[in-house]
Amino acid sequence: MKSLTLLSALLSSAAAAPHLRARDTNSRIVYQFAEGTWVENLAVRQNGNLLLDLVDRPEVYQIDPNANGSSPSLVYRFSDVTSVFGISEVSTDVFNVITGNFSLSTFASTEGSYSVYQIDLSGTNTGVRRVAAIPEAEFLNGMTTLNSNSVLVSDSQAGVVYRVDVETGNYEVVLDDSTMKPPSNASIPIGVNGIRVLNGYLYYQNLFAKLFCRVAIDSTTGKATGPYETLATNSYADDFAITNEAVAYAANGFENEILKVTTAGTVEVVAGSLTSTLVEGATSAQFGRTTKDSSVLYVTTGGGIAAPINGTYTEGGKVVALSGLV
């Protein structure tokens, strides 16, 4: 995003809403890609390895975050799109991902280009198949698992959530509310972004409305069974990890921060700052799954491509391990 007008609008919006100050955090870089790489999202395998997907090119990588000097290996490269977005595990080592066309030079989504694919890592060989093309979609972005047969997918531009049956490929809009829509004055039309299912609720972040919300849902259909609730305002974030206590650790990519957001409405900066490269351009977060890293928060970044530090500084997207947060 090289437009100074757009950058100024984003940073002005960020500066208008201060948060509580960050605490001390232990950190290490798991791996940093080359300049120009945007790491969009991640999932954690049962064995502890991280799956990473990229926006600047249509690739999914795997890396062992606990091995010294580990480098990522390519899992799969898609041939008909530019980018990979949300990722979620539906059964052991079987993941679904969103693919589509998105420009990092104009920050524009190509409507009608989006699909859900399945990547099966449960066997000796990697299996990849297209689950469904969703031509009605405007900008598919976040993904979470509803049950063993279905995922929920956010359309950030349309401000709705789809349920996709990963066996049949059938899909439908199941959630649609004003708290999911992009604000009318948003510099980029992005509303509902990161989504997570927990204990009968869908938790979701509306990026430019700065809302952290939830709605009770049916575990089979994904449709709302209760009211849409706004839990926190001033939550300026993309995707997030969520604890069993429904505390979100959210990636604020425009202020280079990780936010701790609670259902009581508190928003606290726990890592990073506007001028820090610790998590510059943070995009998503997940906790580890092994005994050695279950309290480690893994954060992916886009390297500040969307909002360079001081308007000029960017770096290669990376994966950062943060400890001491929980």
Image: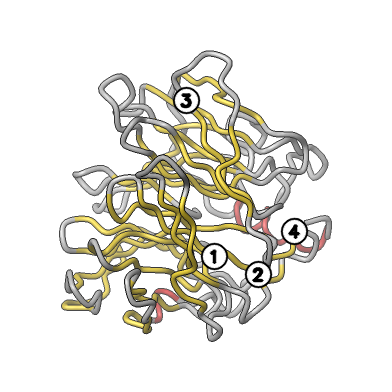
Q: Assign a secondary structure to mark 3.
A: loop
Q: Quadrant of residue 325?
A: top left
Q: Nearer the viewer, mark 4 or mark 1?
A: 4
* Residue 151 on image: x %, y %: 34, 66
Please indicate whether residue 13 sits to the left or right of residue 320 in the image: right
The local crowd at label 4, few if under 14, some if 14 to 19, many if 20 or more residues have their Cα within 10 Å, is some
Residue that numbered label 3 is attached to: 65
Residue that numbered label 4 is attached to: 104
Residue that numbered label 1 is attached to: 208
The answer for how far apart the CA atoms under marks 1 and 3 are is 31 Å
Amino acid on which the number 2 mark rests in the picture: Ile
The answer for how far apart the CA atoms under marks 1 and 2 are is 8 Å
* Residue 236 on image: x %, y %: 50, 55
Q: Quadrant of residue 274?
A: top right
The local crowd at label 3, few if under 14, some if 14 to 19, many if 20 or more residues have their Cα within 10 Å, is many
Q: Quadrant of the C terminus?
A: top left
Q: Nearer the viewer, mark 1 or mark 3?
A: 3
Residue 69 lies, with reference to residue 86, above or below; the image says above
Please indicate whether residue 3 sits to the left or right of residue 255 in the image: right
